[in-house]
Amino acid sequence: MKFINIGFGNMVAADRIVALVSPDSAPVKRLMQDAKDEGRTIDVTCGRRTRAVIITDSEHVILSAIQAETIANRLEDDALGEDEENTEEE
């Protein structure tokens, strides 16, 4: 199982991520508020501004202070590293 750093030493399992979005649009703000009301929000911003919203397959909503693009790059780098490992094993 691969984990991705989402800021301040917090990690999330890469294979559990369904969506990685910016918190600026109205639908995402509604999603965040609904999740907060239902107790499905995990806030790992450490008091900073939310810059990325991660939606998991368990319908939890994770708020991160790291840019969505940065997290996406970490996911891509992790996937590329996994492909290289598979190639080396063959």
Image (spheres, grey):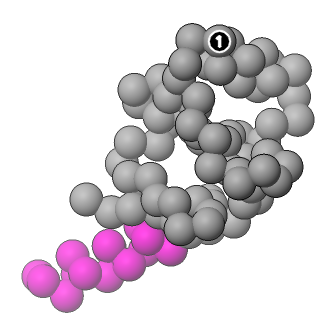
Compared to residue 56, the image places residue 86 above or below, namely below
- Residue type of the residue flagged with mark 1: Asp
Q: Which residue is depicted at the point 71% across and 54% down?
A: 46
Residue 68: x percent and y percent?
A: 71, 54
Residue 58: x percent and y percent?
A: 40, 26
Compared to residue 53, the image places residue 28 above or below, namely above
- The outermost residue toward the front is 47
Q: Is residue 5 magenta?
A: no
Viewer-proximal residue, 65 or 84? 65
Compared to residue 38, the image places residue 44 above or below, namely below
- Tag 1, which secondary structure? helix
Q: Quadrant of the N terminus?
A: bottom left
What crowding class fits label 1: few (fewer than 14 Cα within 10 Å), some (14-19), or many (20 or more)?
few
Q: Which residue is depicted at the point 12% across and 83% down?
A: 89
Viewer-proximal residue, 15 or 84? 15
- The outermost residue toward the left is 90
Do we see residue 51 in this rendering? no
What residue range appears in magenta? 75-90
- The secondary structure that dominates the magenta segment is helix
